[in-house]
Image (cartoon, helix red, strand yellow):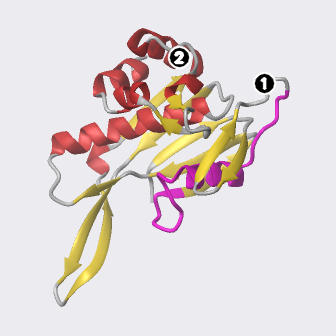
């Protein structure tokens, strides 16, 4: 199965707090490479992708580069325009998560959404997934370029400021984060070569 593929070099620390997560800022004084399993844990704990529903998978770990596969789930019957928008928004979202909770400098993301269909003849409770390959999207993104665009779009100069910490827990997206991830124009700007 294909999906979003991330090539990342990271250094972060994840702390689980009750049903929320707190992710401490990366230690930039060290050049530690985080394993693929640790990246899977980060993505699982953030809750958007999971190995159990096949939207998250470790593909490869070679030369300190981790490759993960991520696929957004799209409901059957969704219009082509909405699928394209969701595909691009998912790349923006994953990019901002990785830059916010790690010290990676660049990522390459390829996404192929999964269409979810409910029910089959004789069993309405079944769910079937199929890849929507015609909506494949690829972007190569750098921390410096994306941060410059974030600064211009929402007047924020560090990725950590995309989260509301007023509840004492890091990792709750604020309105600036939502403005970016639900805006195809933001994706078009960050993915432009």
Above or below 162: residue 77:
below
Name the residue at 26% across, 47% down.
134
Query: For the point 24% across and 68% down, which residue is it?
Result: 117
Q: Quadrant of residue 13?
A: top right
Q: Which residue is at 48% across, 54% downward?
A: 49
Q: Which mark is residue 77?
A: none
Does 42 appear above or below 64? below
Viewed as shown, does residue 22 lie left or right of 116? right
In the picture of the structure, the residue carrying the numbered disc 1 is 28
* First in sequence: mark 1 vs mark 2: 1
Query: Residue 173, how many percent across, how many down?
Result: 47, 35
Label 2: which residue? 147
Residue 145 in percent (x, y) is at: 52, 15
Residue 130 lies in the magenta-colored region: no
Residue 89 appears in the picture as rendered: yes
Instruction: Count residues near mark 1 (Cα–Cα under 10 Å), then give few for <14, some for 14-19, many for 20+.
Output: few
Judged from the image, the secondary structure of the residue bearing numbered disc 1 is: loop
The stretch in magenta equals: 30-56
User: Which residue sits at x=65%, y=48%?
Assistant: 39
Would residue 36 be seen by someone viewing this image from the given angle? no
- In the picture, measured across the screen, residue 54 lies left or right of residue 137, that is right
Front position in the image: 127 or 168: 168
Residue 13 located left or right of residue 153? right
SS state under label 2: helix
């Amino acid at each position: 199965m294909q999906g979003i593929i991330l090539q990342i070099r990271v250094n972060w620390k994840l702390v689980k707090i009750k049903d929320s997560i707190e992710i401490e800022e990366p230690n930039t004084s060290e050049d530690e490479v985080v394993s693929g399993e640790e990246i899977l844990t980060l993505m699982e704990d953030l809750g958007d992708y999971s190995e159990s529903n096949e939207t998250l998978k470790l593909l490869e770990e070679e030369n300190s580069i981790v490759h993960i596969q991520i696929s957004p789930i799209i409901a059957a019957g969704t219009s082509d325009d909405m699928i394209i928008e969701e595909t691009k928004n998912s790349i923006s979202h994953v990019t901002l998560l990785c830059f916010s909770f790690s010290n990676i400098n660049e990522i390459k993301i390829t996404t192929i959404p999964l269409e979810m269909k409910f029910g089959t003849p004789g069993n309405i409770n079944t769910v079937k997934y199929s890849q929507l390959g015609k909506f494949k999207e690829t972007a190569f993104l750098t921390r410096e370029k994306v941060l410059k665009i974030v600064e211009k779009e929402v007047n924020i100069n560090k990725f950590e400021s995309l989260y509301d910490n007023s509840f004492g827990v890091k990792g709750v997206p604020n309105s600036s984060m939502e403005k970016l991830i639900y805006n195809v124009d933001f994706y078009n700007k960050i993915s432009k070569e």
